[in-house]
Amino acid sequence: MTGGAHGDLDEARHAVASTVRFWGDRLVGLSHSLHDEPETALHEHRSAAKIAELLVEAGFEVSRGVGELPTALVASHGTGELVLGLCAEYDALPGIGHACGHNVNGAAAVGAALGLAAAADELGLTVKLIGTPAEEDIGGKALLLKAGVFDDVAAAMMVHAAPDDSVGASSLAIGAWDLTYTGTPAHAAVAPWEGVNALDAMALAHTAIGLLRQQLPPGALVHGIVTEGGQAVNVIPARTRARYEVRAPSLELLSEVRERVRACFEAGALATGAALELRPHGQDFAELRQDPYMTEAYVRAARGLGRTVTSRQGETLASTDMGNVSRLLPAIHPTIGYDTAGARQHTPEFTAHGKSPGADRAVLDGATALALVGADLAASAEQRRRLLAGLAERRAGR
């Protein structure tokens, strides 16, 4: 299709691609700067400021600290009825920096917003860049959804750094707990029987979870770390703290699995006499649901840029709070690949490739491909109707 309800698609595509090229050096510079100054969840102050400053320079209206999250932001351009959202991630991992490639993710989303903005008036669009902090922790997108930041967004997009290009995969739903066992201290040699061992409670719970794994349904996972296990080896530990995550193929199954894991924690308390406190950590992440039309449009755009894209329909790739967005509105979350010498995400080796020529190309290709998907959606009368109808239905259902 070369024309649509709003503007000529070929002209819009040209404007998108040329605009991303125009900003190319700045986008790569942004990616490198984010990589060089990694900031963890809810501490991404410099990262958010870098993104905001670039978008202000490009003529966007920028609001910082949206949704009561100091490091979240919204940048808008255009006045069209159809609002398309680009989700920018920029939080890093403790100790290993941008080991999930969020410097690439964030810079690509910014580039896509810049590209689409160049055609926004012609296509009847409002472009909305949403800076979403803490994806690696409490789930900024889920919190921004609750705060209403996505209420006017008809479709949302982002790309995610990876060792290869792929589309169509789902993700695992995930929920996390912070837990504390509280016991009674005692001298470990003189009178250990007078103590209540909080570390024993944790050991029993961890063992019970290990045994439970055989009975968990396919795709369900449990993992955790002990963050405090006592203060002195000759004192019965009176407090043990830990964080555990439960994953499952859907939110519904997550709820079932979590109750079985909860019973393991309760068993540790019952067996030792320690008191148990369980507190949810952050937001539950839903499974990812990728929009078929947007996925096909992305594949066309990426292949047009010379990229090889693999379909991972039916597979699951880790967890993301983009799943929460995708349960409410059409969304895509493809991976954009570059050579990492075999390293996978969440490792120092993956971090080391985040400023490589391949990663730089991923920033620009990801930006262009996402922006071309947005242009396709806006120029198609059928897709425009679908997205606006879905938005009206969401609003009516609130």
Image (cartoon, rainbow, N blue to C red):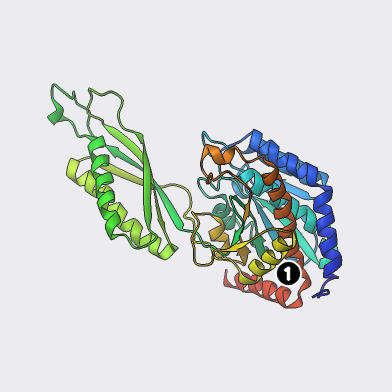
Give the quarter of the image for residue 212. bottom left
Crowd class of label 1 (few under 14; some 14 to 19; many from 20; radius 10 Å): many
Residue picked out by circle 1 = 377
Residue pushed farthest bottom?
382
Q: Up-down: is 119 above or below 70?
A: below
- Horizontal side of 323 relative to 366 (left or right) equals left
| 7 relative to 60, above or below | below
**Looking at the image, which residue is at 70% across and 62% down?**
303
Measured along the vertical axis of the image, is residue 185 above or below residue 366? above
Rendering coords of residue 282 (x, y %): 47, 48
Residue 315 makes an appearance in the image: yes
Picture coordinates of residue 316, whole percent (x, y) = 48, 60
Tag count: 1
**Amino acid marked by disc 1:** Leu
The answer to which image quadrant residue 251 occupies is bottom left
Quarter containing the N terminus: bottom right
The front one of 250 and 121 is: 250
Left of 95 or right of it: where is 230? Answer: left
